Amino acid sequence: MNKVILMGRLTRDPEIRYSQGNDQMAIARYTLAVDRRFNRNGDQTADFINCVAFGRSAEFAEKYLKQGTKIVATGRIQTGSYTNKDGNKVYTTDVVIEDQEFAESKGSSSSDGGSYQPAGRPSPANASAEGFMSIPEGIEDDLPFK
């Protein structure tokens, strides 16, 4: 089975082209920056995944996606190769997008750099050394457990 699920942000606006011939089809290319899990040093790195979408998926990308947009995309890995103008063989790996959708609301990506913190909840920075947060005063009776 060849199935890929990615969540990341577009590194730039999608590049849109149309195929030649009677039945023109949209082709969108974009790169997703996908965060890796934290390593032991606490450093965070990202992989930059080349994606290509065809037809309606490409038209969606052209109309709605832009640099910085966080999406979830599913598709399949496709490899290929070609010989460049210098005579060198170049190998390619792309994710052919089958489905894509927004991973956050439109306002959250532009207003706070993409980090979501529900209103009225303490931030993780308020956690104690044991990893637990203090219960704010006055809500003890509203908790479903005691």
Image (cartoon, helix red, strand yellow):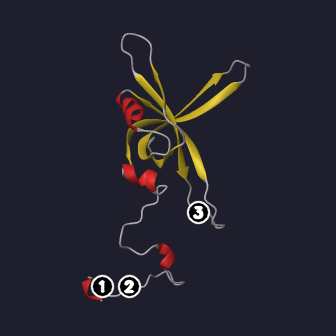
Dot 3: element = loop
User: Which circle, 3 or 1, is nearer the viewer?
Assistant: 1
> Disc 2 to disc 1, how far (Cα)?
7 Å
* Residue 143 located left or right of residue 82: left
> Disc 3 to disc 2, how far (Cα)?
28 Å
Above or below 105: residue 42: below
Res 99 visible: yes
* Residue 38 located left or right of residue 51: right
Q: Are marks 3 and 1 in contact (CB under 8 Å)?
A: no
Dot 2: few (<14), some (14–19), or many (≥20) neighbours within 10 Å?
few
Would you name the residue on which mark 3 appears?
38
* Nearer to me, 101 or 13: 13
Residue in the picture at 41% in, 54% down: 108
Q: What is the x, y in percent for residue 47?
A: 58, 48
Q: Are marks 3 and 2 in contact (CB under 8 Å)?
A: no
User: Which circle, 3 or 2, is nearer the viewer?
Assistant: 2
Above or below 105: residue 63: above
Q: What is the x, y in percent for residue 62?
A: 41, 31
Quadrant of res 11:
top right
Q: Residue furthest top?
A: 22
Would you name the residue on which mark 2 appears?
135
Amino acid tagged 1: Ile
Would you name the residue on which mark 1 appears?
139
